[in-house]
Image: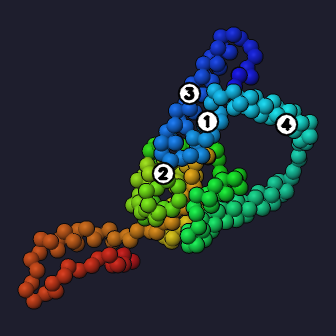
C-alpha cells in the first residue's frame, strides 16, 4: 500500500520504510498465527501482504473503493448538535444496548456449548456479526501493568485455541499468558461485566461470566469466574500455632477447618 503522504522526500522515504516494516510484521504475525492454529489471522495477513498478482489487484480495487466511499461519506455526513439531556439519553440507550450485546454473546457461547455445537462455526458467526462495543487494538502478550487492582477468582475458560475446553486458571496473570491478552484488559472486561469500576474489582463476590477477544481477527473466549474462598486474616497464625502445639491423645484426629470462620465484628 503506497503512503498517502505527499510532502518532503525524506519524510516520504520514512513512511515507505515504515510500511515495509508493517508489511513484514503482518506477514510474520500471520505465520505465527497459523502456527498457533489461528487460521483467521493467517488468512487476513495473507490478504494484506501476499505478492500474488490477483491479491494485489484486489487490494488496489478495495483501496480505490474505500477512497470513493470516504468521499461520499464526507458529502453526506452532517454535524449533529445535541443538548446535554439528549446526549445523556442517547448514552443511556447505548449503554443498555452494549450490555445486551455482551450478554447476548456470552449466552450464545453458553448455549452452543451446552448443545455441543461446533464452537468454531459459532465463533466465526459471532466474528462476522461483529462487536462494536470492543476496541480493535491488539494487546501485547504477557504484559503486565503497574499498580493493577487485584481480584481473587478462579477462571474457567471455553473457546479459542485452548488445549482443553473449560481449562481452569487461578489468576488473571496466568490466563493472560494462555490467551495472549494483557491482564489489565481482562480485568476491564471483568469489571464491566460485574458493573463495577476497574479499581473496585476486588469487591466482586459473585460468579461473573464474560467474553473477550484478545485479537480483533482471532478467537473469542468465554470466561466464567468464581470467587475464591477467603480465609480470616489470623487463620495462618492460628494454623501455625496449631502445628506447634502437640495434639492431645483424646482430642480430634483431624485438624480444624478455618475456611469458613467468620471475621469478628
Q: Secondary structure at mark 3?
A: helix
Question: Image check: 104 left or right of 212?
Answer: right
Q: Choose between 112 and 211: the one closer to the eye.
A: 112
Spatial distance from mark 1 to mark 4, Cα to Cα? 24 Å
Residue 176 placement (x, y as % from top left)? 46, 51
Is mark 3 in CB contact (under 8 Å) with mark 2?
A: no
* Front position among marks 3 and 1: 1
Q: Is residue 195 visible?
A: no
Compared with 44, 5 (above or below) is: above
Residue 166 placement (x, y as % from top left)? 46, 65
Spatial distance from mark 2 to mark 1, Cα to Cα? 23 Å
Residue at the image position 38 percent from the left and 71 percent from the top: 229
Question: Image check: 107 left or right of 58?
Answer: left
Q: Which residue is mark 2?
A: 179
Q: Which residue is mark 1?
A: 46
Q: Secondary structure at mark 1?
A: helix
- Could you classify mark 4 by the number of other residues whose Cα lies within 10 Å: few (under 14), some (14-19), or many (20 or more)? few
- Disc on the earlier residue, 4 or 3: 3
* Front position among marks 3 and 2: 3
Numbered badge on residue 24: 3
Spatial distance from mark 3 to mark 2, Cα to Cα? 24 Å
Q: Residue furthest bottom?
A: 250
Compared with 140, 183 (above or below) is: below
* Front position among marks 2 and 1: 1
- Could you classify mark 2 by the number of other residues whose Cα lies within 10 Å: few (under 14), some (14-19), or many (20 or more)? many
* Front position among marks 1 and 4: 1
Residue at the image position 15 percent from the left and 71 percent from the top: 243
Q: Choose between 14 and 195: the one closer to the eye.
A: 14
Amino acid at each position: 500500500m503506497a503512503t498517502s503522504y505527499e510532502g518532503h522526500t525524506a519524510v516520504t522515504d520514512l513512511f515507505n520504510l515504515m510500511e515495509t516494516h508493517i508489511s513484514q510484521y503482518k506477514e510474520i504475525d500471520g505465520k505465527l498465527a497459523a502456527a498457533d492454529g489461528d487460521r483467521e489471522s493467517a488468512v487476513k495477513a495473507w490478504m494484506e501482504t501476499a505478492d500474488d498478482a490477483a491479491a494485489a489487484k484486489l487490494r488496489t480495487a478495495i483501496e480505490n473503493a474505500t477512497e470513493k466511499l470516504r468521499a461520499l461519506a464526507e458529502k453526506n455526513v452532517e454535524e449533529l448538535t445535541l443538548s446535554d439531556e439528549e446526549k445523556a439519553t442517547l448514552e443511556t440507550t447505548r449503554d443498555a444496548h452494549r450490555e445486551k450485546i455482551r450478554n447476548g454473546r456470552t449466552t450464545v457461547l453458553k448455549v452452543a456449548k451446552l448443545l455441543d455445537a461446533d464452537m468454531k462455526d459459532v465463533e466465526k458467526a459471532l466474528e462476522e456479526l461483529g462487536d462494536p462495543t470492543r476496541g480493535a487494538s491488539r494487546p501485547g502478550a504477557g504484559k503486565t501493568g503497574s499498580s493493577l487492582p487485584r481480584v481473587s477468582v478462579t477462571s474457567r475458560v471455553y473457546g479459542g485455541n485452548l488445549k482443553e475446553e473449560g481449562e481452569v486458571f487461578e489468576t488473571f496473570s496466568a490466563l493472560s499468558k494462555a490467551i495472549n491478552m494483557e491482564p489489565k484488559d481482562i480485568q476491564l472486561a471483568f469489571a464491566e461485566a460485574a458493573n463495577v469500576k476497574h479499581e473496585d474489582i476486588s469487591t466482586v463476590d459473585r460468579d461473573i461470566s464474560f467474553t473477550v477477544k484478545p485479537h480483533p481477527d482471532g478467537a473469542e473466549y468465554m470466561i466464567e469466574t468464581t470467587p475464591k474462598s477467603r480465609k480470616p486474616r489470623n487463620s495462618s497464625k492460628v494454623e501455625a500455632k496449631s502445628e506447634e502445639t502437640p495434639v492431645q491423645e483424646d482430642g480430634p484426629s483431624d485438624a480444624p477447618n478455618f475456611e469458613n470462620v467468620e471475621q469478628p465484628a
